[in-house]
């Protein structure tokens, strides 16, 4: 069953790039690829810079429409991982015999599904928001997401390559869709005009959103769980 499956073969080939020294592998993961500042700063810094680079309601409205799409697609990716399982997450599938650098990772996940990558959906979506406003910086962000955020997650056995492809289609596709439909951008333009004399409120909410997004909406997830499952 494993042999001849391109997705599995590519996963195992990339996973074989890990050396035999698990201490070194863990050091690389926790200090570089799993480090929130290393992976997030090149994405979130341009978002903040673009937001404050002039008082353009059009640009901020496009960004807000893109951020709304980002939120919805990230939530959808979480939902799909819980309710749609085309395959078990590699490090949770004993049949694959993937090299696991840190055995404690097995107990991290509360869902066996890994399609699509929620992290990939979030960061590809944010890179698309940046790309729409600045193509050069946006291209750099896409390369960064591929090389530093999503590729290592396949190498370390967190995701299949198809999980990354799914997030690459899901996130950016929805961001472009929300920007191409005039309704969403126009709606945020009206909201910004409404708060024109109180833009400090919008700025504060923007930063709260980015802070929660930086941690993959951990705060929002906990609030939703309390609302939906108060006794669990």
Image (cartoon, helix red, strand yellow):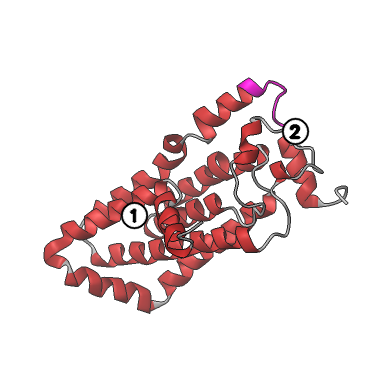
On the image, numbered disc 1 is attached to which residue? 209
Q: Residue at x 70, y 25 (%)?
A: 19
Q: Is residue 22 magenta?
A: yes
Helix, strand or loop status at disc 2: loop
Residue 50 visible within the image: no
Q: CA distance from mark 1 to mark 2?
A: 37 Å
The residue carrying pointer 2 sits among few (fewer than 14), some (14 to 19) or many (20 or more) residues within 10 Å by Cα, namely some
Quick check: 56 left or right of 86? Answer: left
Q: Which residue is mark 2?
A: 16
Is residue 198 found inside the magenta-colored segment of the image? no
Task: Specify the segment rendered in magenta.
Answer: 16-23
Query: In percent of the image, x 75 and y 45: which residue is there?
Result: 93
Instruction: Tell me where residue 200 sits by quadrant.
Output: bottom left
Residue 63 seen: yes
Q: Around disc 1, counting alpha carbons within 10 Å, would you say few (fewer than 14), some (14 to 19), or many (20 or more)?
A: some
Judged from this view, the residue extending furthest toward the left is 197
Q: Nearer the viewer, residue 105 or 136?
A: 105
Q: Position of residue 6 (x, y in %)?
A: 80, 51
Question: Residue 16, percent across and down?
Answer: 75, 33
Residue 104: % across, % down: 62, 33
Residue 112 in the image: above or below residue 77? above
């Amino acid at each position: 069953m494993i042999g001849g499956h391109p997705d599995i073969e590519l996963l195992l080939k990339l996973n074989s790039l890990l050396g035999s020294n698990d201490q070194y592998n863990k050091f690389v993961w926790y200090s570089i690829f799993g480090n929130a500042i290393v992976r997030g700063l090149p994405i979130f810094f341009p978002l903040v810079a673009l937001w404050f680079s002039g008082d353009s309601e059009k640009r901020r409205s496009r960004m807000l429409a893109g951020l709304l799409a980002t939120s919805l697609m990230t939530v959808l990716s979480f939902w799909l991982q819980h309710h749609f399982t085309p395959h078990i997450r590699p490090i949770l599938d004993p049949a694959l015999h993937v090299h696991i650098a840190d055995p404690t990772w097995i107990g991290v996940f509360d869902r066996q599904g890994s399609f699509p990558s929620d992290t990939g959906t979030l960061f590809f979506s944010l890179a698309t928001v940046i790309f729409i406003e600045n193509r050069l910086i946006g291209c750099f962000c896409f390369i960064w997401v591929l090389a530093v955020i999503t590729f290592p997650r396949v190498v370390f056995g967190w995701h299949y390559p198809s999980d990354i492809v799914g997030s690459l289609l899901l996130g950016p596709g929805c961001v472009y869709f929300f920007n191409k439909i005039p309704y969403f951008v126009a709606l945020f333009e009206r909201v910004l005009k409404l708060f024109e004399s109180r833009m400090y409120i919008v700025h504060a909410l923007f930063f709260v959103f980015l802070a929660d997004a930086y941690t993959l909406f951990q705060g929002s997830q906990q609030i939703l769980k309390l609302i939906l499952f108060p006794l669990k």
